Amino acid sequence: MDLSGLIQPSLLHSAAILTVILAFAGYLVTFLSARMLARRRDKLRLVNKRLNEFYGPLYVASQAGHIAYRSLLKRQGKEKSEPIRDEDLKEWILWMNTIFMPLNDIREKIIIQKAYLIIEEDIPQCLLEFVTHVVGYKAVMAKWAEGDFSERRSTIGWPPEFDHYVRRSYATLKAEQTRLLHNSAWRLYQRLFNGRKRKAQKAKPRP
């Protein structure tokens, strides 16, 4: 009995099924890869936004303020600013008006206007304490403007955790940014995307 007539349709049927399975598998891999890359792209965009608009400027301003503060203490031969002696008052007011308060204003503005970029779900206590510290200094400096120097520092102390929080958060986000940028799948996506973009630009007719 000749079975070739039965075997051939069976093989064709199996090949068709295999083709469908492979096509579906390819589609599934492509879909999952695209979804993963989209999530990574969105995550990188958020990390960049947090660095560029919140933690980066906050970190730079904080570092500048710390360097300026240490410089003033060294200039006055002190380990800490308190107590502010009578002979140091004029210089202290000058540095507050020209250096420390402008840097405080920058940071206060960032915290208030860009609070939606904070990593944590709730605003960290040290950020709230920093804003109230700055508000306290505004009241003190208003008295200075009227010639009243009875108060020399903000009645609300500097939050000791503030600089550490800013430095730690900035370092964490930079590490996350580096990890996302150096991922092999992301680099491949960027190469393909930039290649298509360049081809599209070349295809455009020149005016």
Image: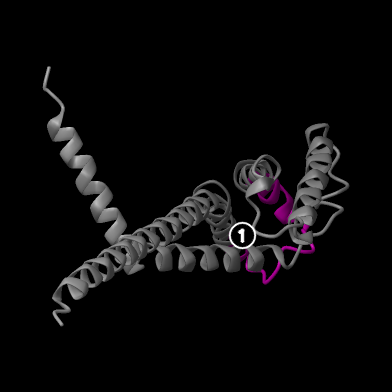
Placement of the N terminus among the 4 image quadrants? bottom left
Residue 64 in picture, x, y percent from top left:
54, 56
> In the rendered image of this protein, does residue 156 appear above or below residue 137?
below
Tell me which residue sits at (19%, 36%) in the image: 200
From the viewer's side, name the closer residue of 113 and 122. 122
The colour scheme of the drawn protein is one colour
Magenta stretch holds residue 184: no
From the viewer's side, name the closer residue of 9 and 63. 9
Q: Amino acid at mark 1?
A: Tyr
Placement of the C terminus among the 4 image quadrants? top left
Tell me which residue sits at (61%, 47%) in the image: 103
Is residue 86 at all visible to an observer of this figure? no
> In the rendered image of this protein, does residue 82 appear above or below residue 132?
below
Residue 22 in picture, x, y percent from top left:
30, 66
Q: What type of secondary structure mainly makes up the magenta span?
A: helix
Q: Which residue is mark 1?
A: 69
Tell me which residue sits at (52%, 51%) in the image: 46
Magenta residue span: 72-96
